[in-house]
Image: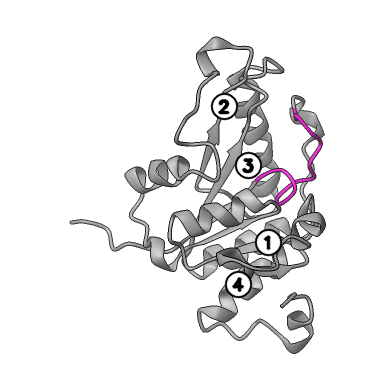
Amino acid sequence: MALKPRPAVFLDRDGTLIPDLGYLSDPTKVRLYKGTAEALRLLRSAGFYLFAVTNQSGVARGYFPESTVKAVHRRLQTLLKLKGARIDAFFYCPHYPEGKVQRYAMACDCRKPKTGMVKQALRKYAVDLRKSYMVGDKMDDLQLAHNARMAQGILVRTGNGKMTAKRLKTGPLAKSGVVLDVLQAARLILAQNGNPSWTTEDSKTIVP
């Protein structure tokens, strides 16, 4: 019997779930933003799949191997589980056209804002994409939500988010939600899906 499709929240990694330290190559430096675990617990309790989608061009640039990316994700998952939260699956793009490692130096279909990582998730999980969201701190995250025809892209003001918010003036991405952090993003998503946890005070964090 086929599983009934469920909505998902696709989450950027660096600058959204954890501080952006550049090309992160040391799993011991992984730290959760305050509110990350709570955000994921709220979304999971509401029935959303949780997927991390992250561009990791450091692999193609020769800064670290794919095994390092996987080690960082294991560390991130461990920290989340200690707080009663978890990610359902991690998807990453190791490619970059001008990369120094020939195996990864290519124009791919998985580097955000292209939709390859979303398609990977769809092949493994029964996802209702039209009711799904993308949360991130960069324009590529919002563009991915648009390209994949998700319900909405939501920009967090952590990481590069403050700078990105200044660019959201016109065009199809101007309707993206803009909030303080991933916890506020989770509450906004829940509010849009009939959960009353989004308060008047929370609404002040949204930028028109």
Which of the two discs, 1 and 4, sits closer to the camera?
Answer: 4
Which quadrant holds the N terminus?
Answer: bottom left
Q: Earlier in the sequence, mark 2 or mark 1?
A: 2
Q: Which residue is mark 1?
A: 155
> Regarding mark 2 in the picture, which secondary structure is present there?
loop
Q: Residue furthest front?
A: 170
Q: Is residue 83 above or below residue 30?
A: below
At label 4, which amino acid type do we have? Lys
Amino acid identity at mark 3: Gln
Report the disc number at residue 77: 3
Pointer 2 or 4: first along the chain: 2
Residue 156 position, x and y percent, is 72, 61
Q: Residue at x 63, y 75 (%)?
A: 188
Residue at mark 2 to residue at mark 3: CA–CA distance: 19 Å
In the rendering, which numbered label is found on residue 175? Answer: 4
Q: Residue furthest left?
A: 1
Position of residue 106 measured from the top left corner of the image (x, y, whole percent): 51, 22
Marks 1 and 4, Cα distance to the nearest angstrom?
11 Å
3 or 94: nearer the eye? 94
Mark 3 vs mark 1: which is more N-terminal? 3
Tell me which numbered mark, 2 or 3, is placed earlier along the sequence: 3
In the image, residue 133 above or below residue 143: below
| Residues in magenta, as a range | 13-24
Residue corresponding to mark 2: 94
Circle 1 SS class? strand
Q: Secondary structure at mark 4?
A: helix
The amino acid on which the numbered mark 2 sits, given as a three-letter code, is Pro
- Asked whether the beta carbons under mark 3 and mark 4 sit within 8 Å of each other, the answer is no
Cα gap from disc 3 to disc 1, whole angstroms? 22 Å
Task: Give the label, 3 or 4, closer to the camera.
Answer: 4
